[in-house]
Image (cartoon, coloured by chain):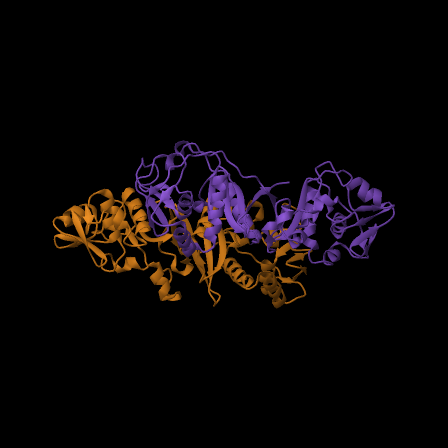
Chain colours: A orange, B purple
Amino acid sequence: MEGRLDGDVVRVGGDARQRYYDSSGYGRPTGEGVALAPVEAAHLLFRGDLDAVDGLGFREFLAIEDRLVVRFLVYRDFRERGFYLSPAREGWVDASALSSDATPDSHGGDADAQAGPDLIVYPQGKGPWDDTIAYRIWVVGEREPITASSLGKCVLAVVDEESEITYLDTSCPTIDGSTTNVLPTTVSGDLLADRAILWNPPDGLYEAAFYGQRLAGRGAEGGPLQLSLVETAYLLGESVIDLGVDLATVVERGRRVEGERFDRRLAVYTTLREAGLVPKTGFKFGADFRTYADVESVDDLGHSERLVRVLPADHAFAPRELSLDVRLAGGVHKRMTFALTTPTGDVDWLAVERLTP
Amino acid sequence: MEGRLDGDVVRVGGDARQRYYDSSGYGRPTGEGVALAPVEAAHLLFRGDLDAVDGLGFREFLAIEDRLVVRFLVYRDFRERGFYLSPAREGWVDASALSSDATPDSHGGDADAQAGPDLIVYPQGKGPWDDTIAYRIWVVGEREPITASSLGKCVLAVVDEESEITYLDTSCPTIDGSTTNVLPTTVSGDLLADRAILWNPPDGLYEAAFYGQRLAGRGAEGGPLQLSLVETAYLLGESVIDLGVDLATVVERGRRVEGERFDRRLAVYTTLREAGLVPKTGFKFGADFRTYADVESVDDLGHSERLVRVLPADHAFAPRELSLDVRLAGGVHKRMTFALTTPTGDVDWLAVERLTP
């Protein structure tokens, strides 16, 4: 059969509706015929189920539009995995399926526009005539930046330079834990460069609440406790410690070593502690924090569940950095979680993980 | 015993030479006594083997110098692991031990200055009176940037914000492989956006030389071959393919999508291919390339051995990015390798891996 290009659709007449739509979920019915999105027409040409579009074969048709090839690669991949899917176009799929903006109230319209999914994938065995959706797919090339605030509901299909596809599922998790502690007050210590040392800390501060590290090293029984600058600032704000300097001095020192990033990390640290989690450094994993949701004692500490990277809410990810973080987190059985800090000091959570459809 | 601060050393008299130097390798002998570096004095104070320095105890002494605490933490760690070590000072250790600059001819003096090691560690059972060295240790806080060109001979001891230490061994590897191929000429194809497609490629181009990916997906027998833009530019330069456009056009398109980085990646790709390795995308690992040293056939491909990240030679690492890359590479049993590209188009290789002393 032959199709003809009409604006942004390919129209096919005759029994195309039955052949393409009814039997395999391609396109949209228009009376007897169907309207196909270019990506659908490309796939039918690739399979040999459509002979030509305005005389163009698969090879020539792929060239009509720059982004058609990457869309085609993802479309084909889902078809080969046994899914039916539709282009995410107004009027083609339910409007509710089109927005993939995580938190509409907190983000701008351009993020929505950028994040509008390209493809709507139906559960296996379902199709466009059903009203259930498996995935909202946003197709991006590996070099296209992705605004953090536009993620949270869609699945990124990143097509790398060699046309391999990596699927990254994004969600907005609720972060909470069960760790509670009664803390002492005005424990004395010294501020040394970018850390603090408590020379005679009360035992519970480390063993139960998991603040700091023993100066004598891991596993040491008692003795002086070292605090990171972010732990220091938090505990000073809570009046748990007294270093003979005020909070502003500590924050100033933090800014000196890492700029405004220190303020954002302190905001995230505080949010995590208040949510009942214990954040510790994620340095060995290249992250800001690793978190423990339920700490009763350092002696029987489980594995940390999340790796947290602190980013400004307007951060634009390079797909490669996402791939790096998610791959590493998966390898150590933790969930990669981004803490998006807004100028108002709020924290939006974004979890990203590898998906195999 | 008591010591006294004299310039940048702590002098201890009496039988200090025998107590500290002869029996445990602390300091430098000065007649009967010894001259101790502050980090050595701090450790002796910490152990209680020295009572005070000018009346200062361990707590007060730690505060005399901003970087003393991080140096102390690393010094103590090696002592606890059973090593003797010396501060890397002119006249205290052999001059040859002091330079940790990888390729003196190609880098500036300030890199040397920055990279001069802090501590010289002797093999277990050896000491300052022997002339063998186990590690040149460069102590850095997790927030101190590290010039790439100053690495290659030293071990980085990164003290993170919670005072945990990560050791990263750096070296300048020779990169070579055994992959050789006789390539066809003027294979025709199309340039599509940021990739190319060869519609009727000769079999060997993929199966033997491992260029591109089958359009029909992994494992497909024959059919059109997709090339990444960097593969396209390389093969065009070698006159292997003919896309009806010249090399400049492809390079221009590469710069459009990733700026001058494309030129650097092409230089590294070319260097790797000429050295007998097969570079493929490292996207799934967050790297530029993964490399195979000995490819005879794609059908019995082993695991790739290296992950390669392309960086300008003057790049300054944040310790956290090094930690992320090295941790990921270790987790997938590959060697993290940085390709440092100089303005002249040369490539210096830098390998970094986790070390447990």
User: In which quadrant will I find the C terminus of chain A?
Assistant: top left
Foreground residue, B254 or A302? Answer: B254
- The quadrant holding residue A188 is bottom right
Q: In this rendering, would A110 be left or right of B136?
A: left
Foreground residue, A110 or A287? Answer: A110
Which x, y percent locates residue B220?
Answer: 32, 37
Foreground residue, A90 or A65? Answer: A65
Q: In this rendering, would A110 be left or right of B145?
A: left
Which x, y percent locates residue A253?
Answer: 62, 63
Q: Is residue B229 visible?
A: yes
Q: How many marks?
A: 0
Q: Could you tell me which residue is drawn at 72 percent across and 48 percent down? A: B88
Which x, y percent locates residue B50?
Answer: 80, 49
Foreground residue, A352 or A173? Answer: A352
Q: In this rendering, would A50 be left or right of A211?
A: left
Which x, y percent locates residue B139?
Answer: 66, 50
Q: Is residue A223 visible?
A: no
